[in-house]
Image (cartoon, rainbow, N blue to C red):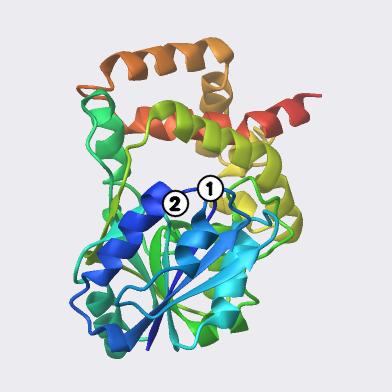
Amino acid sequence: MISVIIPTYNRLFSLKDTIKSLEGQSLDVGKFEVIVVDDGSNDGTYEWLSEYRGRLDLKCVRHPTNRGTATTRNDGIRTAKGDTIVFLDDDMMADRDLLSVYLNAHQVEDGVFIGNVIYKKNARERALLQYLSTRGVHKGKKDFTCFITQNASVKKKDAIDAGLFDDSIPCFFQGEDIEFAYKLSLLNKRFVYIKEAVAFHSHTVNLQKVLLDAERFGKHILPLLLDKYPAFKKTFKLYLLDPVHLLKEPLSFSVQKLIVRFSLYRRIYNLIRRLTILFNGFFVPLIFFDYLIFYNRTKWMSQRQSL
């Protein structure tokens, strides 16, 4: 049995579409349940869920106050009756075969499965959307850094064995996904991208939000992760910020560090950002987005090291 876990907070307008998409699944409704964890909403979400009389086996867990997505998902996992968990955000619409695809995948192999997220088209963000659809798992990368709970599936036992999500991570910033995935990797779990497990984002993304999320992650979450897991320094290539030691390291490595240091000058960043914004509706080299995200993710650490 599958347990679909949906954390929600003041998004009743999009949550209704998410629920509707699950009502139309090709998988028999008797083979899955839907658990919505209302994280202190005040927009009528709990009232609507309480009065739900649709065809789904829908359960609602309510938090009286906002406690964050880590705690929310953990409560969903604890409530789940199914041995298979599917994480879905409250602004996603599931393709009709989503749950069938995940169920079949778990029957074939023991892994952590990452679905295909398709963003709403936006002509002004065409290059960014192209970048997001061709990075990470889309490139064939198969490690914990690709795991996102927008659309993913894991065995309940594995989630519990991994210690669930870290609810000490500040609730208003992203980061619990990758920490949870790293703990799954320590269990030697294989991460598998399933292109056919499709969920549609109900709204588009924009460059400003992507960069703001990267900055918040670097300022508030990355230091916590590094204290807990030193291996994350390699994961996020933070060794490139270390001092250059021409006599103690390969010359090519020193040159790489120097190039990164030069690229982190504010004037370089401003130029690349302006060019990206200007041509975002047409074509932008993918490396530009890599650079902008790296800059925003690491700028607070760079400032600390320069003090």
Left or right, 222 with reference to 269: right
Depth check, front residue: 24 or 5: 24
What is the quadrant of residue 117 in the picture?
bottom left
Q: Which residue is mark 1?
A: 43
Left or right, 88 with reference to 295: left
Which mark, by number, is residue 12? 2
Q: CA distance from mark 2 to mark 1?
A: 7 Å
Tell me which amino acid carries mark 2.
Leu
Q: How far across and how far down the image is residue 29, in percent? A: 28, 83
Query: What is the number of callouts on the image?
Result: 2
Tell me the crowding category of disc 2: few under 14, some 14 to 19, or many 20 or more residues within 10 angstroms, Cα based. many
Label pair 2/1, CB-CB below 8 angstroms: yes
Which residue appears at 26% of the width and 63% of the height? 21
Tell me which amino acid carries mark 1.
Asp
Above-or-below relation of 186 to 257? below
Where disc 2 sits, the SS reads helix
Q: How far across and how far down the image is residue 181, in percent? A: 53, 66
Above-or-below relation of 21 to 55? above
